[in-house]
Amino acid sequence: MVEFNYVKEFIEQPIKKNWELNALSDYKGITYTYADVAKKIHHLHTIFRSWDLQRGDKVALIGRNNANWGINYLATISYGAVIVPILPDFLPTEMHNIVNHSDSVMLFIDETIWENLSVDQMPNLKAIFSVNRFELLNSWDESCRNSYLSNLSSMEDEITALSPDRVSYTEISNAELAVISYTSGTTGFSKGVMLSHNSLAANIDYARNNMHLVARDSIVSFLPLAHAFGCAFEFLFPFAMGCHISFLTKIPSPPIILEAFAAVRPRLVLTVPLVIEKIFKKQIQPKIETPIMKVLLRIPLLNKLIFKKINEKLSNAFGGNFHEIVIGGAALNSDVERFLRKIKFKYTVGYGMTECGPLISYAGWKVNPMGSCGRVINYLEVKIDSSDPQNEAGEILVRGENVMMGYYKNPEATEKTIRDGWLYTGDLGVTDKNGFIHIRGRSKSMILGPSGQNIYPEEIEARLNNLPIVQESLVLLEKGRLVGLIYPDFESMKQHGILPQELEPVLEDYRKEVNKHLPQYSQIAKLVVHNQEFEKTPKKSIKRFKYQYSDN
């Protein structure tokens, strides 16, 4: 067990130590000090008591990144309840499903999202509150409502008198459940990852000893807070260090992200490969591939000056004040990585998964070798399921303090993933002689969306495979868009009177219909006919790595 109590060490103490400092801001919006955060947590704890929220009860949270989202999160776990963060991009049916599957009894939600949900579809909820204003939207218990109203005056007096020495949260064991993080919203695929306070403590303690933030440092939060990567390292870790976190409240397109970086000038940047790769492709690659530049880059000394200038320009794009950029969530394009090495850009690549809350391995930019995602963190052990771990790729297995407690109400999935104490990651890799992990492939098929969303192609394929003339399908990411390969059901085509030359327009109609039931980030750009059955493993799973769609 981690020696630091999560709530006391990483929520209560930062509030006490940094009372007057800025804590959370909405970019171009409101700013809260650590004192303001404490007062709002007190307000939410009063709401929890009024509705008789018990230790271990589940509280669902739906909304885009903003300061009040963060305060809801901190208030819930410091009370001893369990937070259930839900991606705001999920469809209403998926949100209903997660609220119900998680046994949530309270819901905090963005009011614009609430307009599309149905109270009747979430019968276990006691109350629904606005995530932005903490105001009651709906409740079925008049006595709880009256209790809250009667507590308002005393609560206001308590908040006015609140000071650092009066901030004291319940002692909560690190062994207790803190978060249920859903990797998907669809009923047949929902898996709620149970993370303990110990998992959060291990991640944050490792980060503070290795990622070098201090009080008053600035951070931009744009990765989805409902996912473990963004939540842990753009929010929980910097909050624990007394930093000032600015949340992008809009959908984080690259121009908006870069504008915020320029204004905030963050000390640490967390990002996904797509952001780096887009900047490289649009701003750098066209310039270095001109005929004259190709000649100049072959001239010794001159090329070093050019690389230095490019490094400065790229660094300034991220605010010019960071000591490191940490890339995670997916593999970084090897061509992009080689170029970043040439210009001596201060980046590193880490490795993790939700089931570890999320960090598995990391190393700073000065020591992390090309193609590596770092060394296993001190709270974990790692082994490669291979007879020759340095030369023959095998599945990466980990065990230790920050591994999940299991999947909520899904013992079968838990038993498949955790065996003999080891978490089977589903990723393939090797370790070099110095202990650095090099991922060689992903046996799991998750695709990272444009803003860090998890896209599970099996869910989309399940919808496609239900169409009358589709025998099987395969969804791939090609050139930044999702493409569906379709192996037709030729017998069904005959039955429906569909000729081969009529197949493409029929598939286009199917594509539009399927997209109506998918979030924007996981919609299909194109369906392509694949005239042969997909190659399969002995277990009859499609060998995804064998297929790559081409426009040619």
Image: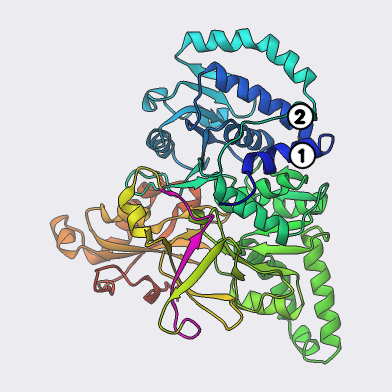
Residue 346 x, y percent position in the rendering: 75, 69
- Provide the residue span drawn in magenta: 389-406
Q: Position of residue 134 (x, y in %)?
A: 62, 24
Left or right for 199, reference 421: right
What secondary structure is marked by label 1?
Answer: strand
Of labels 1 and 2, earlier in sequence is 1
Above or below residue 239? Residue 254 is below
Q: Quadrant of residue 98?
A: top left
Q: Amino acid at mark 1?
A: Ala
Q: Callout 2: few (<14), some (14-19), or many (20+) C-alpha neighbours within 10 Å?
A: many
Amino acid type, callout 2: Asp
Residue occupying the point 48% across, 62% down:
399
Give residue 347's position: percent from left, percent from top: 71, 68
Instruction: Pick whichever, 22 or 383, lies toward us.
Output: 383
Report the residue at 83% width, 69% height from top. 312
Q: Which mark is residue 23?
A: 1
Which residue has dot 2 on it? 36
Left or right: residue 253 compared with residue 160: left
Marks counted in the figure total 2
Question: Is-magenta flag for residue 403?
Answer: yes
Quadrant where the C terminus sits is bottom left
- Under circle 2, the secondary element is helix
- Real-space Cα distance between discs 1 and 2? 9 Å
Residue 340 belongs to the span the image colors magenta:
no
Query: Which numbered disc covers residue 290?
Result: none
Residue 472 appears in the figure: yes
Q: State the residue in front, 544 or 368.
A: 368
As drawn, 114 above or below 551 = above
Q: Given contact means CB atoms under 8 Å apart, are the residues at marks 1 and 2 in contact? A: yes
Q: Examine the rendered structure and indicate whether residue 242 appears above or below residue 439.
A: above
State the image coordinates of residue 246 (x, y, percent, origin top left). 74, 44
